[in-house]
Image: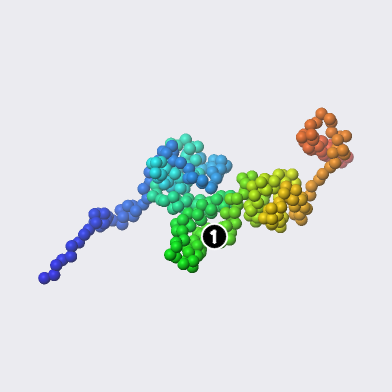
């Protein structure tokens, strides 16, 4: 006589048997909680900037009228507080709108999982600054490498290289930038803040900025002074030469000045005057630092006088 097999029904699965399709779908939806803003912290070293611009003003107005449509994503920390994984702009808009709580989805994430999700969600923005890409790529790549694991002694070099190749391939698939371009962006994190700001403002082109990143901090400060003095930024060939001089330990402030002072085909023409030619026309009461303003005002006055003279001649 055959024995019947014992049937072990999990209670959760048993309850789901009596759910309709709508109930099952609803049970799988993320749970949204109203979290006090006072209990939420920024993500550590968050690379994306929250700007107080017109877009933020519009977001604040939208929050006042309709509230938060898409909940932010949080991760609970060991001390019981929360940190933002996705939604820094929405959290700021809630603060400016005078709200005390924000709807949020709370996810159980490790530090590296949170970093990857944070970068992934923010890379969906329509406008991303080079500095934001630089630091976010660096954070994400480091997290992915930690997840892949360190090289093990019992693994062959081929196995360890394959891990690196898979990480680079996955990164390209997720960001759209190849390995070489990713590392170029990461190089920008070696720039001093003032030069990195100039990259964000399109005052220094991307490829020259990558070459400049190999300069020492002192050399970069000397370059910044030279840029200000010459009102010119280095071209790619100039940046490569700066890097070569730096590598040889010969990049002095004088060398930087000589390279940056070279005339470039696309460089704006500069007008200069000898002080002795201008001094007779400038009152001695005008301070040296106000000389340029005085000359501009004099030229504006002269231009208005010429226009008035032309109108009188046309009558």
Q: Image height check: is 214 above or below 65?
A: below
Q: Is 223 positioned to the left or the right of 118 in the image?
A: right
- Of residues 303 and 310, the one nearer the viewer is 303
Q: Is residue 216 visible?
A: yes
Q: Give residue 67's position: percent from left, percent from top.
A: 45, 41
- Of residues 48 and 33, the one nearer the viewer is 48
Q: Residue at x 79, y 47 (%)?
A: 270
Q: Is residue 126 visible?
A: no
Q: Residue at x 57, y 52 (%)?
A: 134
Q: Give residue 8's position: percent from left, percent from top.
A: 21, 59
- Of residues 132 and 99, the one nearer the viewer is 132
Q: Give residue 66's position: percent from left, percent from top.
A: 45, 42
- Number of numbered discs: 1
Q: Residue furthest front?
A: 153
Q: Is 238 positioned to the left or the right of 301 in the image?
A: left
Residue at which label 1 appears: 176
Q: Residue at x 42, y 46 (%)?
A: 74
Q: Residue at x 61, y 45 (%)?
A: 193
- Of residues 244 and 186, the one nearer the viewer is 244
Q: Give residue 166's position: percent from left, percent from top.
A: 48, 64
């Amino acid at each position: 006589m055959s024995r019947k097999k014992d049937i072990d029904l999990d209670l959760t699965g048993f309850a789901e048997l009596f759910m309709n399709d709508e109930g099952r779908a609803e049970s799988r939806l993320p749970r949204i909680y109203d979290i006090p803003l006072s209990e939420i912290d920024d993500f550590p070293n968050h690379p994306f900037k929250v700007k107080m611009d017109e877009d933020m003003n519009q977001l604040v107005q939208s929050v006042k009228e309709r509230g938060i449509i898409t909940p932010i994503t949080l991760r609970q920390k060991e001390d019981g507080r929360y940190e933002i994984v996705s939604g820094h702009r929405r959290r700021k808009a809630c603060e400016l709108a005078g709200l005390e709580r924000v709807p949020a989805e709370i996810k159980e994430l490790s530090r590296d999982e949170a970093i990857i999700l944070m970068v992934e969600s923010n890379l969906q923005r329509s406008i991303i600054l080079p500095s934001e890409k630089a630091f976010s790529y660096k954070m994400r790549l480091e997290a992915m490498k930690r997840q892949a694991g360190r090289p093990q002694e019992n693994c062959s070099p081929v196995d360890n290289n394959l891990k690196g190749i898979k990480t680079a391939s996955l990164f390209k698939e997720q960001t759209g930038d190849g390995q070489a371009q990713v590392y170029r962006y990461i190089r920008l994190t070696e720039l001093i803040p003032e030069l990195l700001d100039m990259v964000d403002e399109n005052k220094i082109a991307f490829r020259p900025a990558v070459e400049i990143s190999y300069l020492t901090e002192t050399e970069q400060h000397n370059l910044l002074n030279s840029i200000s003095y010459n009102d010119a930024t280095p071209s790619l060939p100039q940046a490569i030469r700066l890097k070569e001089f730096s590598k040889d330990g010969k990049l002095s402030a004088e060398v930087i000045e000589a390279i940056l002072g070279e005339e470039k085909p696309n460089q704006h023409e500069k007008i200069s005057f000898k002080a002795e030619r201008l001094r007779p026309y400038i009152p001695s009461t005008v301070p040296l630092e106000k000389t340029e303003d005085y000359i501009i005002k004099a030229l504006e006055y002269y231009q208005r006088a010429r226009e008035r003279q032309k109108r009188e001649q046309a009558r």
